[in-house]
Amino acid sequence: MRPKPPAAIQLFRRNRRMTIAIGADYIDGIIICADTKVVASDGATTSDMKISLALGPPQRAVAVATAAEDARAATMLAEEISLAAGARDAGPEHIKAIMTAWHNAYGEQRAPQLQFVLGDGVNQTIYLCEPPATVWECGPIAIGRGSRAVEPFLDIPHGLVPHSASMRATLLRMAFLMYRAKKDEGSSCGGDTHTAVLPRGGMFFLVPKEEMAVAEKLAAEIDGLMIDAARMITADLSIIDGSGNSLGKLSSQYEALLERWRNLDFPSIRLHEWEKGKKQKIPG
C-alpha cells in the first residue's frame, strides 16, 4: 500500500485543479504524462503543454507536470523547479527554497494554489511538490481533478502501474488511466496526452501524442469489455438465456483485444532502444 499523503495534500485534493497528470516509475526509469486541456475562469477552453523538462549534469533529466488554478504562474514555477532539480547536487531542500521564495513574494496577497509531480530519471524518484514547502517522495501518483478517476487503480494492492513493469507495459497502462480520467472528468480533462520518459541512464525522450492516442483508443474498447463482463456476471442467473454463448462471445472479445494490446506499437520506444544499443556499442 502507498503511504497516505500529508494532510495539506489531502486538503488540496478536495479543491482539485482542472487537469490530469500522472507520474509513475517503471523498472528502469520514470514516466510523466499530462493532458493538454486548459479551462479558464470564464469556462473557455484552450490547449497547452503542462510538462516542463530540464537536463542537467551529468545528463540528469527531470520532468515536472502541473495542476494549478493559475496556468501562467504554474508554468513559470515549474520551469524554475525543473532547472533546480536538474542541477548536479540538487535535493528536496533546493526545491523547497524556490517554492518558498515564490510563495513569499505574494506577501499578504493569497498565492495561487499549485501542485506539481516531479520525476527524476537518474535517481528514479517521484516527488509531489506544493508551495510553500511540501516536497514528498512517493510512488505512482496522479494530480488534478482527473486524479479521482485514476487513484483507485493506483491504490489497490498490486496496482496497475507496478515498479517492476517494463517501459512499454507502463506506457500502455498509463494510456488506460489517461483515458479513464478524460472519460470520467471530461469537463476538466481532455485533449492530447503529452508524455515524457526519463530512463535511469539519463537523457529523456517524448512519446508522440499520436502514439498515446492510439493506445487510449484501444483502452476505450478494453473499458467497454470490462463493463460487458460486469453486466454478464451480475445478470439474473435464474433466467436461462444462452449465457454459455455470452461467455463464449466475451472470451473471444478478450482474446482479440489481448492480441491487439500485445501488438500495439510505440515507434518512439523502438527508436530509443535502437539509439541506446548504438551508444553501448561505441567504445569508451
Image (cartoon, rainbow, N blue to C red):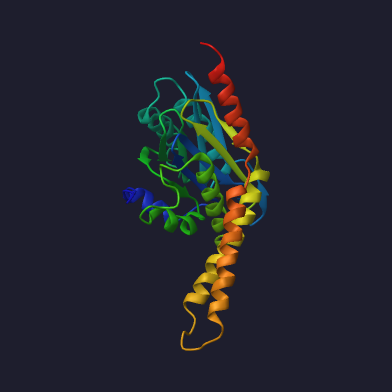
Location of residue 154 in the rendering, given as x and y in whole percent from the top left corner: 42, 53
Decide if residue 165 is on the left or right side of residue 271: left
What residue is drawn where x is 59% and y is 66%? 252
Determine whether 125 is above or below 16 in the image: above
Front residue of 83 and 169: 169
Determine whether 22 is above or below 199 in the image: below
What residue is drawn where x is 38% and y is 32%? 96
Decide if residue 87 is on the left or right side of residue 184: left
Determine whether 255 is above or below 239 in the image: above
Front residue of 65 and 43: 65
Location of residue 164 in the rendering, given as x and y in whole percent from the top left corner: 41, 42
Location of residue 230 in the rendering, given as x and y in whole percent from the top left corner: 49, 72
What residue is drawn where x is 48% and y is 54%? 147
Front residue of 262 and 268: 262
Q: Quadrant of residue 51?
A: top right
Q: Quadrant of residue 219?
A: bottom right
What residue is drawn where x is 52% and y is 50%? 173
Front residue of 38 and 268: 268
Decide if residue 194 is on the left or right side of residue 115: right
Name, please, the residue furthest toward the bottom: 239
